[in-house]
Image (cartoon, rainbow, N blue to C red):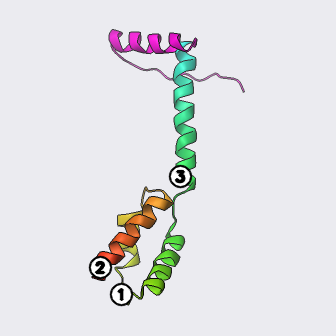
Amino acid sequence: MAKDNFIKLRCTDEFKAQIEALASKENRTVSNYIENLLSNEINKNKKENAKMMDYEEMVSYVDEVCNIEGYEDSPAYDLIYSECCNGRNGEDAKEMILDMLRKYNE
């Protein structure tokens, strides 16, 4: 794939020297070093986002937990989703949902 776009970064001489030193340690050009860092972060972000719990999964999980635990009441789904799921991976969301439901039903 042709690389014909540029991103400019303004920084101090000290910061540039630090980046150059890091790139040199890995026998990379500065451009390749920065591209590699950003590519790794993008891939990591894709994996994390792929594991996020969506609204329907959350509703199903809340209903399942309430059934198993015998909870007769729970906070509104929208509240649970905004507090526990938004921006979190599925495992973290499940832990937060369990905690919220326990506290709500004490």
User: Would you identify the image quadrant in which residue 73 lies?
Assistant: bottom left
Which residue ends up furthest to the front in the rendered image?
A: 69
User: Would you identify the image quadrant in which residue 17 lies?
Assistant: top left
Among numbered discs 2 and 3, the one appearing first in the sequence: 3
Q: What amino acid type is highlighted by mark number 1?
A: Asp
Q: Mark 2 = which residue?
A: 104
Q: What amino acid type is highlighted by mark number 3?
A: Asn
Residue depicted at 41% across the width and 65% down the height: 95
Any magenta on residue 25? yes
- For the C terminus, the image quarter is bottom left
Q: How many marks?
A: 3
Is residue 26 left or right of 94 when viewed as pictured? right
- For the N terminus, the image quarter is top right
Any magenta on residue 47? no
Is residue 102 left or right of 36 when viewed as pictured? left
Residue depicted at 35% across the width and 70% down the height: 99
| Relative to 77, residue 4 above or below | above
Q: What amino acid type is highlighted by mark number 2?
A: Tyr
Question: Residue 34: where, in percent of width, then height?
Answer: 51, 22
Mark 3 or 1, which is nearer the eye?
A: 1
Is residue 66 left or right of 42 when viewed as pictured? left
Q: Mark 3 = which residue?
A: 49
| Relative to 69, residue 30 above or below | above
Which residue ends up furthest to the right in the rendered image?
A: 1
Residue depicted at 52% across the width and 50% down the height: 48
Q: Start and end of the magenta stretch? A: 1-28
Task: Tell me how far mark 1 sits from mark 2, CA to CA.
Answer: 8 Å
Q: Mark 1 = which residue?
A: 73
Task: Tell me how far mark 2 sits from mark 3, CA to CA.
Answer: 28 Å
Among numbered discs 3 and 1, the one appearing first in the sequence: 3
User: Would you identify the image quadrant in which residue 94 lies?
Assistant: bottom left
Of residues 82 and 92, the one nearer the viewer is 92
